[in-house]
Image: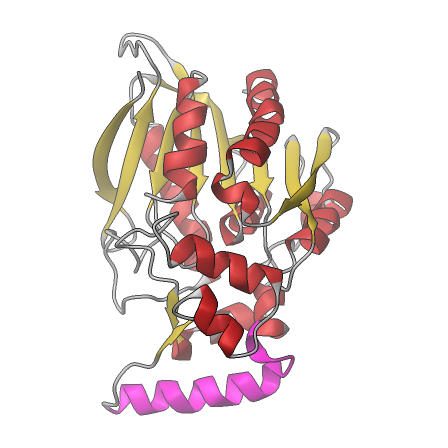
Amino acid sequence: MTTVQQVTYRNLGWDSAADLYLPPNFDAAKRYPAIVSTHPIGSCKEQTSGNVYGRQLAQAGFVVLAFDASFQGASGGEPRLMEDPAIRVSDIRYAIDYLVTLPYVDADRIGAIGICGGGAYTVSAAVTDYRIKALTSITGVNFGRLMREGFSEFDPRGALKAMAQQRTAEAQGAERHVINYLPDSVEAGKQAGLTDIDVLEATDYYKSARGQQPNGATSGLFSFNSAAIAWDAFAHAETLLTQPLLVVIGDKPGAFGAFRDGWEIYGRAASESKQIVVAEGWSHYDLYDKPEPVALAMAQIVPFFQQHL
């Protein structure tokens, strides 16, 4: 049976909160391969990164650390609900720092996995942190591209002007402007004229009993989103991303762009060992928790990490 321990460790100037998943029949005298699991944007460690992929990887024999991003969930940091890609990538490095202090973790066998935005953050971390020996991106989304396109209504310069004005106002004492990335319910989204599969299925996951968790905020601090607009999760992948890479995507494309981003990083990565798995008939959010597509993904992920860690 998998054991889950709640742990904290020091980050830049605050504490990170994480769930540590230990394999069945765990023996602290042994040394295990370990995997850092990074949650999607607007999510938390209790959702897909932990209770789905983290738990199943632990059952397969890996020590898995699923953490809350800085400024989000149970982790520290102010202001709350900030989504800064550079710090999100730094969070992965600090998670590795914690893992290598554990006597039962083999520091030479550390991997990383991420879902949605967490998948692209994992790619970015691996570009410059070679402690990551192998990585998997599950329906990964390049948040920088998404901010330049759909999340700014394809007007990134206009969005930057609005963010600048709002940040100045907040520095002068105005109330923080928090935006919700999703409608309150699928029905509300449809009534508002929303039709995109990613938006509606995200709402079904995050705003219903299916995936809802207290710390899954699905919201962000508008004035600090400017940090993402000029950021590329895949920068320098052509030359520096050399670790074994597994990309998993569904074949039903949506507005968040995981299908396109998956093929892009697969093509750009310098990794000699790389593969892409397309889950036919399944969508971005199906890969969060639906048993059949998750099983399809895990059938590739487990042997991939067993081979490379």
| Depth order, front residue of 48/190 | 190
In the image, is residue 167 part of the stretch drawn in magenta? yes
Q: Residue at x 59, y 31 (%)?
A: 297
In the image, is residue 192 part of the stretch drawn in magenta? no
Instruction: Please state the extent of the stretch shown in magenta in the rendering.
Output: 151-172
Q: Residue at x 25, y 60 (%)?
A: 77
| Depth order, front residue of 155/122 | 155
Q: Position of residue 200 (x, y in %)?
A: 53, 62
| Depth order, front residue of 61/289 | 289
- Name the residue at the right extreme: 267
Indicate whether 244 appears above or below 241. above
Decide if residue 69 is on the left or right side of residue 17. right
Q: Position of residue 119 (x, y in %)?
A: 54, 46
Q: Position of residue 105 (x, y in %)?
A: 36, 20
Residue 181 visible in the shown view: no
**Looking at the figure, which quarter contains the C terminus?**
top right
Q: Position of residue 238 (x, y in %)?
A: 74, 47
Decide if residue 282 is on the left or right side of residue 23. right
Indicate whether 113 appears above or below 220. above
